[in-house]
Amino acid sequence: MDVAVRELKAKLSAYLRRAAAGELITVTDRGTPVAVLGPVIGRVDLAAAAEAGWLTPARASGLTPIRRHPPLRSVLEVLEEDRAE
């Protein structure tokens, strides 16, 4: 949703409630986007977001572990080689 600075000033509390509930609000100045209001990171209610339709729940029940391979060379060795060229 887009909101002009003037309207945001007039109805700040209402827009802050909406942002806290998970809605992203783009603030515009003369039609140009200047900021985005949204919920604090890590505090989004995922169930409410899915219910509102702006988040799609995962369909898979789990991820498979990643198999890590030992490195052939260290990052420092690669960096030194790159700088020598």
Image (cartoon, rainbow, N blue to C red):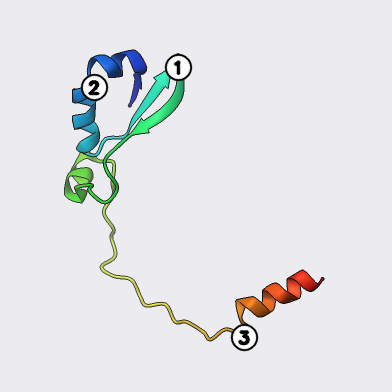
Graded by Cα atoms within 10 Å as few (under 14), some (14 to 19) or many (20 or more), the crowding at tag 3 reads few
Separation of residues labelled 1 and 2 (CA atoms): 18 Å
Closest to the observer: 66 or 42? Answer: 42
Callout 2 amino acid? Leu
Q: Is 42 above or below relative to 75?
A: above
Quarter of the figure with the C terminus: bottom right
Please tell me in which quadrant of the rendered image residue 1 appears.
top left
Q: Position of residue 43 (x, y in %)?
A: 22, 48
Residue, x 76% and y 70% (percent of image)? 83
Q: Is residue 31 above or below residue 84?
A: above
Nearer-N-terminus badge (3/1): 1
Tell us which disc is closer to us: 1 or 2.
2
Chain-order first, disc 1 or disc 2: 2
Spatial separation of the CA atoms under disc 2 and disc 3: 56 Å
Label 3, on which residue?
A: 72
Which of 9 and 57 lies nearest the eye of the viewer? 9
